[in-house]
Amino acid sequence: MGDAPGLEMMTARLQKTVGLARDELGSDEVAALAEVMKAMCLALTDIDARFYVVFAGEGSAGFALQDPGLEPMLTITTTAVVFDRMAMGDANPAVELAMRKVKMGGVPVTRLARVGANLIDTLFKCYREAGS
């Protein structure tokens, strides 16, 4: 198992991931997500980067490197290494969360499970596709 991608590669891979996930989820599911959260943030502490996904009511989703000016309803804070391992299926997200290697803020986990259960799985699947 190699190291996680660096900043430049992670940026390109996550941008591609968001596009693939938007297509995979479809505009109806993205619009439903937009009713609960307008933005989410992935903060990767080891590469000092914050990545944003913005959801719009008409069913579009976009990737941003700069704060979109919307309070993220979900912020996931971890390292690029841990995120990469989880997304690639080499680490269990629940275990990483319990070990405090991943922190989640904003939407309570129970609400996220109800409204965005498919979101994280889809993002991980698309992240793997984006890397191939």
Image (cartoon, rainbow, N blue to C red):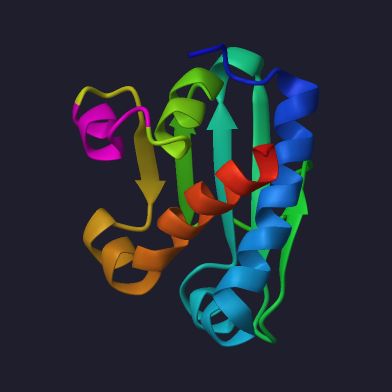
> Which residue sits at x=44%, y=26%?
85
> Which residue sits at x=75%, y=34%?
11
Q: Where does residue 32 sit, x and y in percent of width and height?
A: 50, 82
| Number of numbered labels in the structure image | 0
Q: Which residues are magenta?
A: 90-98
Instruction: Examine the structure image and report whether residue 11 is included in the region drawn in magenta.
Output: no
Figure check: 53 above or below 131: below
Q: Where does residue 109 sit, x and y in percent of width and height?
A: 27, 55
Side of 123 where 17 appears, left or right: right
Q: Where does residue 73 sit, x and y in percent of width and height?
A: 48, 58
Instruction: Examine the structure image and report whether residue 95 is included in the region drawn in magenta.
Output: yes
Q: Where does residue 63 sit, x and y in percent of width and height?
A: 74, 53
Side of 14 where 96 appears, left or right: left
> Which residue sits at x=23%, y=39%?
94
Figure check: 59 above or below 71: below
> Quick check: can you spot residue 68?
no
**Secondary structure that dominates the magenta span:** helix
Quarter of the figure with the C terminus: top right
Quarter of the rendering containing residue 112 = bottom left
Figure check: 71 above or below 83: below
Identify which residue, 4 or 34, lies in the foreground.
Answer: 4
> Quick check: can you spot residue 64?
yes
Q: Residue furthest front?
A: 132
